[in-house]
C-alpha cells in the first residue's frame, strides 16, 4: 500500500494542488484570489503533464552529436519524453494569457465598482 | 410558359395566387384602391383555377404534383382529389365575396392597419387552399400552421386589450393543437413510414405491431390536433375570437379555419385511419358521441346568447359537429353529407356573418335586442339572413336541407338510430334560437330611434345610403342566392358530384 | 457557497484519485506515453530535423502548428488587454 | 487553383489568422480600412471552406498533414462530412456578422475599431480551428484562442459586462482545464494525441478507470463551454452584456462548436459503443438535455430583456442537441447535427435583430420592439423568420431538425424528451408572440399619443443596409436550408453520422 502511494506521489501532489486552486476559484469572494486560484489550478495541470514525461534513469531529450556524423543510434529509453514538455510550453503560455486577460478584466471591474469583493459588488449593483 | 398551365401545375398555380396577391398587397400598401384590386384579382383567379381543375378531376381522377422532398417518403406534394376540391372551391369562391365585403366593411368603419389585414387575409386563404390540396399530413401541417399564424393578427385586429386577449387565447389553443398534430404525424410516420393520404387509410399495417390502445390514443391526439373544428370541450377559442372584424369571423371562423379543422378530421378518419380500422377500433362510435354531445350542448349555449355574433359562433360549433357526426357514422350517405355540408354550411354561415357585419357597419348594432324592426330598415340583409337561418335548420328550399337529408339517410344506413334523434333534435333547437332573431328583426317595432351614422330615423331602408354599403349588401345577397341554388341544383360547382366521387372512392358505392 | 464548493472539490478530487489508481507509476519507462509516439521524436530528431534538442524539434517542427497557435494566444491576450484597458475618453480621430 | 484546393483546409484557418495580424497593422495606419479588410478576409474564408466541403463531397474525408508530418507525430487537420458542413456555416455566419458589425461598432466602440476587428478575426480563427483540427491538443489551443478572444469581446460591452466576462473567464478556464485534463489522461494511457490514432488505440482500454475519468472530464469540460444546464450560469449575463456584434457572433457559434466537440469526442474519439453501451452516459445526457430544454424555456419566459430571453432560448436549444445525442440513435443524431447548423443560423438571425433594434432604439428590452412592424418592416420580417424558425414552423429549417429529434426520441421511447421538446415549442410561441405583440399592436399607443399631443415616440426608422443585408441573407438561408434539407441531409449529414449507431 505504502509502496503504491509512494510510487505515484507525483499524482497526489498535483491533485492536491489542483483542488486547492479549484476551491479558490469557486469559493473565494475576492476576484484577485479567484485569479490566483485559477493560476494554481493551471499550474497543477502543467505539473501533471510534466510528470508524465518522466522516465527513470533517463536524461534530457537532447541527443549528443558530432559535426557531420549525427548522434548515431539513439534509444528512446535513455531520454525523457519531450512531448509533454512541448505541450506544456504551450499550456504555460495559454495560462499566462488567460491570467493577463483576467487581470485586465479585474482592473475594469475595479474601475467600475471600486472593490473586488464579489458580495459587495452584487450588493451595490442595484445602485 | 404554356406548360405551366398544364393540369399538373394547376395546384401550384392555385397556391401561387394568394402568395403573389399577398406580396402585391404588401407592396402597394399605400394605395388602397390598387391594394384592394390585387385582392380581388387574386381571389378571382384563384377561384377560376380551382374551378378549372374540377372537370379534370371528375373525369381523370386526382391530380398529383410533387414539389420537393421534405423527408424520406414525404414530399411537399399536392394531391387534388374530389374531397379536397370541395373545400378548395368553397373557400376560394367565398374569398371573392368576402373581399368585396371587406372593402365595404373596413372602409365603412375606417379601420386601421388595413394593409396588414388584407395581407394576412390572403395568407390565410393560402393556408386554407393548401390544406385542401395537400397530399400528405406534413404538407397539411405546414399549411395548417400558416393558417393559424396568419389569422392571429386578424383576430387581434382591434388591438384593444380584449382583442389581444382573444388573440392570445386563439393562439394558445391552436398552436397547442399544432403541437399535438406534430406529435401525431411523427408517431404515424414512425409506425408506417408514410403520411400520404390514401382512400382506405394508411395505418392498417400498424395494427399488427402496435397495440390497439396506442392507435386509439393516437386518434384522440389527432382530434386534439384539429381543435380548429371547435368540438366541445375545446371550443372556447371560437366565441372569444368573434371579437375580430366581421369579415374575418365570416371567412375564417365560418369557412377557412374551422372548416380546416373538420376537413382534417375527415381526412384523418377516412384517409389515414380508413373505414375498416375505424370500425375495428370502435372509433366511429366514440367520435359520433363526441359530436352529438357538442351538437346538443352548443345549441343550448346558442339559445342563451344575446350578442348576434356570439350566437352565430355557437351555431357554427353546432354545425361543425354535424359535419363531424357525418364523418363518424362511417356510412356512404353520411360521408356525403359531411362533405357537402362543408360547402353548403360555408355559404349559409357566411351569409349570416355578412349580415351581422352589415348591421354593425350600417347601424352599429351588435346585440339581438337592439335589432327590433331592423328588417324594415335593411330588408335585403335580413331576408338573406332569414334564408340562411332557414338553411341552418335544415328546411327546404335552402342548401342545408340537402345535407341534412343525406345525414339522416346516413344514420339509417349506418343503423345508428340514436344519432338520427340527435340530428332531428338539433334541427329543432336551431329553430329555437334563430327564430327569435328573425322575429325581432321583422315583427317588432323600432325601439331606439337612433342610428350610428346619425341619419334620419325612420322605417325607410338605409342599406343603399352610401355606395360603399353596396360592397356589403351585394356579396351577402349573392351568398344567400347561392344557398338556395345549392338546394335546387345541388350540382352547382360540381359539389355533389365531387362528394359522390369521393365517397365512391372510399366505400366503392353509395 | 463555501460548503457547496467544498463538496464539488471533494467529488472532483476523488474522481481524479479514482482515475489515478490505474495510471502507470511515476517514471515508468514502459508507460504507454513513453513508447507510442514519443520515441520517434527522440530517435529521429537528428535525422529528420537536424536538431539535437528533441523538445525544440517538436516545438518548432513536428508540432510547429501548436506553437503558431500559442503565439496567436499570446497575441490575442495582448490585443485583448489593449482593447480592454484603452482609455475610453480618447477622441475618435485623435491618433 | 490546384494549390488552393489542395491546401484549402489549412487556408480556412490561416486566412483569418494572418488577416488578424494584418488588420492591426492596417488599423494603425488607417482605421477605415479595417472593416473592408475583415470582410474580405472572411469572404476568402467562406470561399475556402466551401471549396473544402466541395472536395469532401467529391472525394471523401480530407486528411491534411501540417508540415508534412504523418499523423500521430505531426498535427493533422481532418475535414469530414461532419465538420466540413459546420465549417461552412461558421464561416458564413462570421462573414455575415462582420458585415453587420460596421454600424454597431461605430456606435458602441468608436475608439477601438482596429483592436475590435483583430480580436473578432481571432475569434473566428479559433472557432474554425476547433472544428477543423484532428488533434486533441491542437483543439485545446484553438479553444483557448476562441475563449480568450471571447472574454475580451464580451468585457467591452455595456455596463456590467466586465463582471459577466469575469465569471465567464472562471467558468471557461475550468472547462478548458477539464478538457486538457481529459487529454492528459488519454495521453498517459495511450501516448497519442491524434484523434484518429486514439480511435484505434482506445478500445483496448475501454475498461480502464483512467479512460472513464478522462471521459467524464471531457464531457464536463465541454458542457461548461457549451453552457449545458446546470453549467450554463455564465451564458445569460455574458451574452446579454456583450456588444451587439459580439453576441451575434458568439451566441450562435461558441456553444454550437461546443456541441460539435461533444459529438466528436463521444462518437469519433471514443467509439459510439463506449458512451452508449458501456458507460450509459448518453442516458444521463438525455435527461440533462430534457431539463435544459425545460429550464431554458421557463427562464426565457420570465425575462423582459430580449437578448437575455434569447440567451435562455440558447440554453434550451443546447438541450435539444444534447438530448439528441443522448437518444443515441441515428435519427436523433442526425437531428442534432442538423440542429447545430440550423441553430447557428436561427440564433444569428435573432441576435442580428437584437443588434439592429439596439442600434436604432438604444436598448434591447422587449419594450424596445414597440412598433417595429410599422417603423422597421424589413427588420421585422427578418425577426419573424428567426422567430418562426425557433418555434419550428415549417418550412423554416428549425422544423426539420426538430422533426428528426422528435422522431429519434420516439424511437428511443424517451417520452420525457419528446414532451419537453413539444412543450418548449409552445413556450417559444409564447415568448415570441410577446415580442410580436409589442411590435404589431401600436394602434392604441399611437392613438393615445395623438390625444396627448406629445411628439411621437415611435420615430426610429429602418436600419442601414449594412445591417439589413446580412439579416436578409441569413433569413433566406433559413428558408433554403429548410426547403433543401433533404439534399443537405442525404449528401452530407447522413454520411457524417458516426458508424456503429
Image: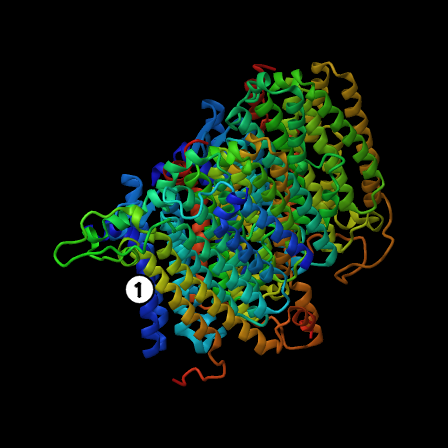
Query: What residue is shown at x 51% (from left), y 66% (from top)?
Result: D154
- The quarter holding residue A36 reads bottom right
Residue D283 in view in this figure:
yes
**Element assignment for label 1:** helix
Residue A104 in the image, given as x and y percentages of width and height:
50, 72
- Measured along the vertical axis of the image, is residue B153 above or below residue B341? below
The one nearer the camera, B425 or D87, is D87
Residue D102 in the image, given as x and y percentages of width and height:
42, 69
Query: What residue is shown at x 33% (from left), y 45% (from top)?
Result: D78
Most distant residue in the left direction = A68
Tell me the quarter of the image containing the N terminus of chain A.
Answer: top right
The chosen color scheme is rainbow
The one nearer the camera, A86 or D31, is A86
Are there few (<14), some (14-19), or many (20+) residues within 10 Å of tag 1? some
Specify whether A94 is left or right of D61. right
Residue C80 in the image, given as x and y percentages of width and height:
44, 70
Residue B92 in view in this figure:
no
The one nearer the camera, B86 or B156, is B156
Residue B283 in the image, given as x and y percentages of width and height:
69, 21
- Measured along the vertical axis of the image, is residue B253 above or below residue C48? above
- Measured along the vertical axis of the image, is residue B384 above or below residue B324? below
- The quarter holding residue B310 reads top right
Residue at numbered disc 1:
D18
Specify whether B362 is left or right of D431. right
Marked residue chain, label 1: D
Amino acid at each position: 500500500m505504502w509502496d503504491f502511494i509512494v510510487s505515484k506521489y507525483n499524482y497526489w501532489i498535483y491533485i492536491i494542488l489542483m483542488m486547492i486552486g479549484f476551491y479558490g476559484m469557486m469559493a473565494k469572494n475576492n476576484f484577485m484570489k479567484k485569479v490566483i486560484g485559477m493560476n494554481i489550478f493551471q499550474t497543477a495541470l502543467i505539473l501533471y503533464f510534466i510528470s508524465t514525461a518522466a522516465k527513470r534513469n533517463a536524461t534530457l531529450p537532447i541527443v549528443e552529436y558530432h559535426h557531420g556524423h549525427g548522434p548515431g543510434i539513439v534509444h528512446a529509453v535513455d531520454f525523457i519524453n519531450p512531448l509533454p514538455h512541448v505541450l506544456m510550453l504551450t499550456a504555460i503560455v495559454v495560462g499566462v494569457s488567460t491570467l493577463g486577460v483576467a487581470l485586465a478584466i479585474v482592473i475594469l471591474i475595479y474601475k467600475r465598482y471600486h472593490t473586488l469583493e464579489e458580495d459587495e459588488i452584487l450588493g451595490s449593483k442595484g445602485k | 410558359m404554356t406548360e405551366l398551365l398544364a393540369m399538373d401545375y394547376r395546384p401550384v398555380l392555385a397556391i401561387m395566387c394568394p402568395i403573389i396577391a399577398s406580396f402585391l398587397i404588401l407592396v402597394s400598401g399605400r394605395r388602397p384602391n390598387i391594394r384592394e384590386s390585387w385582392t380581388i384579382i387574386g381571389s378571382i383567379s384563384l377561384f377560376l383555377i380551382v374551378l378549372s381543375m374540377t372537370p379534370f378531376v371528375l373525369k381523370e381522377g386526382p391530380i398529383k404534383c410533387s414539389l420537393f422532398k421534405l423527408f424520406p417518403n414525404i414530399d411537399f406534394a399536392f394531391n387534388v382529389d374530389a374531397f379536397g376540391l370541395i373545400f378548395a372551391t368553397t373557400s376560394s369562391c367565398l374569398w371573392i365575396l368576402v373581399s368585396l365585403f371587406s372593402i365595404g366593411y373596413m372602409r365603412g368603419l375606417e379601420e386601421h392597419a388595413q394593409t396588414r389585414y388584407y395581407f394576412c387575409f390572403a395568407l390565410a386563404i393560402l393556408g386554407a387552399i393548401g390544406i385542401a390540396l395537400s397530399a400528405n399530413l406534413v404538407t397539411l401541417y405546414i399549411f395548417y400552421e400558416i393558417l393559424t399564424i396568419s389569422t392571429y393578427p386578424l383576430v387581434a385586429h382591434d388591438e384593444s386589450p380584449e382583442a389581444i386577449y382573444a388573440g392570445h387565447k386563439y393562439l394558445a389553443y391552436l398552436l397547442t393543437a399544432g403541437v399535438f398534430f406534430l406529435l401525431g404525424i411523427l408517431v404515424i410516420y414512425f409506425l408506417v413510414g408514410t403520411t400520404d393520404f390514401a382512400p382506405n387509410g394508411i395505418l392498417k399495417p400498424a395494427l399488427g405491431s402496435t397495440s390497439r390502445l396506442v392507435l386509439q390514443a393516437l386518434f384522440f391526439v389527432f382530434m386534439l390536433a384539429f381543435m380548429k373544428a371547435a368540438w366541445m370541450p375545446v371550443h372556447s377559442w371560437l366565441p372569444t375570437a368573434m371579437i375580430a372584424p366581421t369579415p374575418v369571423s365570416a371567412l375564417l371562423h365560418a369557412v377557412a379555419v374551422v372548416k380546416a379543422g373538420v376537413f382534417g378530421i375527415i381526412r384523418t378518419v377516412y384517409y389515414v385511419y380508413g373505414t375498416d380500422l375505424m370500425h375495428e377500433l370502435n372509433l366511429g362510435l366514440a367520435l359520433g358521441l363526441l359530436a352529438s354531445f357538442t351538437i346538443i350542448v352548443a345549441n343550448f349555449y346558442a339559445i342563451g346568447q344575446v350578442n348576434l355574433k356570439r350566437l352565430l359562433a355557437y351555431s357554427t360549433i353546432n354545425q361543425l359537429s354535424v359535419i363531424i357526426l357525418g364523418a363518424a357514422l362511417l356510412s356512404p350517405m353520411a360521408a356525403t353529407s359531411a362533405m357537402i355540408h362543408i360547402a353548403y354550411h360555408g355559404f349559409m354561415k357566411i351569409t349570416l356573418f355578412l349580415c351581422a357585419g352589415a348591421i354593425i357597419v350600417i347601424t352599429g348594432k351588435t346585440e339581438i335586442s337592439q335589432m327590433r324592426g331592423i328588417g324594415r330598415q335593411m330588408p335585403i340583409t335580413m331576408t338573406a339572413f332569414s334564408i340562411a337561418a332557414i338553411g341552418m335548420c335544415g328546411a327546404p328550399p335552402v342548401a342545408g336541407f340537402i345535407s341534412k337529408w343525406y345525414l339522416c339517410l346516413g344514420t339509417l344506413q349506418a343503423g345508428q338510430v340514436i344519432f338520427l334523434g340527435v340530428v332531428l333534435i338539433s334541427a329543432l333547437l336551431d329553430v329555437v334560437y334563430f327564430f327569435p332573431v328573425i322575429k325581432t328583426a321583422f315583427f317588432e317595432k323600432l325601439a331606439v330611434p337612433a342610428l350610428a351614422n346619425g341619419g334620419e330615423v325612420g322605417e325607410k331602408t338605409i342599406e343603399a345610403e352610401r355606395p360603399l354599403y353596396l360592397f356589403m349588401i351585394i356579396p351577402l345577397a349573392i351568398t344567400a342566392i347561392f344557398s338556395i341554388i345549392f338546394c335546387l341544383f345541388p350540382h352547382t360547382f360540381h359539389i355533389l358530384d365531387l362528394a359522390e366521387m369521393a365517397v365512391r372512392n372510399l366505400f366503392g358505392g353509395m | 457557497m463555501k460548503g457547496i464548493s467544498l463538496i464539488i472539490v471533494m467529488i472532483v478530487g476523488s474522481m481524479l484519485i479514482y482515475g489515478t489508481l490505474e495510471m502507470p507509476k511515476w517514471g515508468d519507462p514502459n508507460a504507454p506515453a513513453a513508447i507510442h509516439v514519443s520515441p520517434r521524436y527522440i530517435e529521429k530528431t537528428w535525422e529528420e530535423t537536424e536538431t539535437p534538442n528533441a523538445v525544440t524539434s517538436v516545438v518548432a517542427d513536428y508540432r510547429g502548428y501548436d506553437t503558431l497557435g500559442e503565439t496567436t494566444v499570446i497575441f490575442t491576450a495582448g490585443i485583448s488587454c489593449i482593447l480592454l484597458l484603452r482609455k475610453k475618453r480618447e477622441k475618435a480621430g485623435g491618433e | 487553383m490546384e494549390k488552393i484546393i489542395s491546401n484549402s483546409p489549412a487556408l480556412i484557418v490561416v486566412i483569418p489568422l494572418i488577416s488578424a495580424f494584418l488588420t492591426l497593422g492596417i488599423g494603425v495606419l488607417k482605421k477605415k480600412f479595417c472593416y473592408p479588410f475583415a470582410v474580405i478576409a472572411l469572404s476568402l474564408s467562406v470561399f475556402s471552406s466551401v471549396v473544402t466541403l466541395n472536395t469532401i463531397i467529391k472525394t471523401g474525408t480530407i486528411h491534411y498533414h501540417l508540415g508534412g508530418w504523418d499523423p500521430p507525430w505531426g498535427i493533422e487537420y481532418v475535414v469530414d462530412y461532419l465538420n466540413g458542413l459546420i465549417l461552412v456555416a461558421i464561416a458564413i455566419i462570421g462573414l455575415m456578422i462582420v458585415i453587420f458589425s460596421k454600424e454597431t461598432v461605430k456606435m458602441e466602440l468608436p475608439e477601438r475599431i482596429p483592436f475590435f476587428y483583430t480580436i473578432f478575426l481571432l475569434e473566428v480563427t479559433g472557432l474554425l480551428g476547433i472544428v477543423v483540427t484532428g488533434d486533441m491538443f491542437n483543439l485545446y489551443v484553438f479553444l483557448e484562442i476562441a475563449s480568450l478572444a471571447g472574454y475580451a469581446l464580451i468585457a467591452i460591452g455595456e455596463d456590467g459586462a466586465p463582471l459577466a466576462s469575469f465569471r465567464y473567464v472562471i467558468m471557461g478556464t475550468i472547462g478548458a482545464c477539464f478538457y486538457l485534463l481529459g487529454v492528459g489522461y488519454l495521453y498517459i494511457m495511450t501516448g497519442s494525441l491524434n484523434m484518429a490514432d486514439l480511435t484505434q488505440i482506445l478500445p483496448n482500454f475501454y475498461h480502464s478507470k483512467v479512460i472513464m475519468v478522462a471521459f467524464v472530464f471531457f464531457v464536463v469540460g465541454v458542457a461548461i463551454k457549451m453552457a449545458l444546464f446546470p453549467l450554463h450560469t455564465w451564458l445569460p449575463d455574458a451574452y446579454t452584456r456583450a456588444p451587439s456584434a459580439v453576441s451575434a457572433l458568439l451566441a450562435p457559434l461558441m456553444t454550437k462548436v461546443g456541441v460539435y466537440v461533444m459529438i466528436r469526442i463521444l462518437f469519433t474519439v471514443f467509439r459510439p459503443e463506449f458512451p452508449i453501451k458501456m458507460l450509459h452516459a448518453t442516458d444521463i445526457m438525455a435527461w440533462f438535455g430534457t431539463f435544459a430544454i425545460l429550464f431554458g424555456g421557463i427562464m426565457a419566459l420570465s425575462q423582459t430583456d430580449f437578448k437575455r430571453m434569447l440567451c435562455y432560448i440558447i440554453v434550451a436549444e443546447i438541450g435539444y442537441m444534447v438530448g439528441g445525442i443522448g437518444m443515441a440513435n441515428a435519427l436523433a443524431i442526425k437531428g442534432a447535427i442538423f440542429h447545430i447548423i440550423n441553430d447557428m443560423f436561427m440564433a444569428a438571425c435573432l441576435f442580428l435583430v437584437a443588434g439592429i433594434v439596439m442600434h436604432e432604439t438604444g436598448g434591447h428590452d422587449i419594450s424596445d420592439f414597440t412598433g417595429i412592424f410599422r417603423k422597421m418592416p424589413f427588420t421585422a420580417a427578418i425577426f419573424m423568420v428567426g422567430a418562426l424558425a425557433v418555434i419550428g414552423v415549417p418550412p423554416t429549417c428549425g422544423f426539420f431538425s426538430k422533426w428528426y429529434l422528435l422522431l429519434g426520441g420516439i424511437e428511443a421511447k424517451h417520452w420525457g424528451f419528446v414532451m419537453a421538446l413539444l412543450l418548449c415549442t409552445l413556450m417559444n410561441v409564447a415568448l415570441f408572440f410577446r415580442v410580436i405583440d409589442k411590435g404589431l399592436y401600436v394602434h392604441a399607443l399611437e392613438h393615445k399619443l395623438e390625444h396627448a399631443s406629445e411628439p411621437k415616440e415611435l420615430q426610429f426608422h429602418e436600419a442601414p443596409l449594412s445591417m439589413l443585408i446580412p439579416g436578409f441573407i441569413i433569413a433566406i438561408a433559413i428558408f433554403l436550408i429548410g426547403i433543401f434539407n433533404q439534399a443537405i441531409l442525404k449528401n452530407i449529414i447522413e454520411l457524417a453520422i458516426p458508424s456503429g449507431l
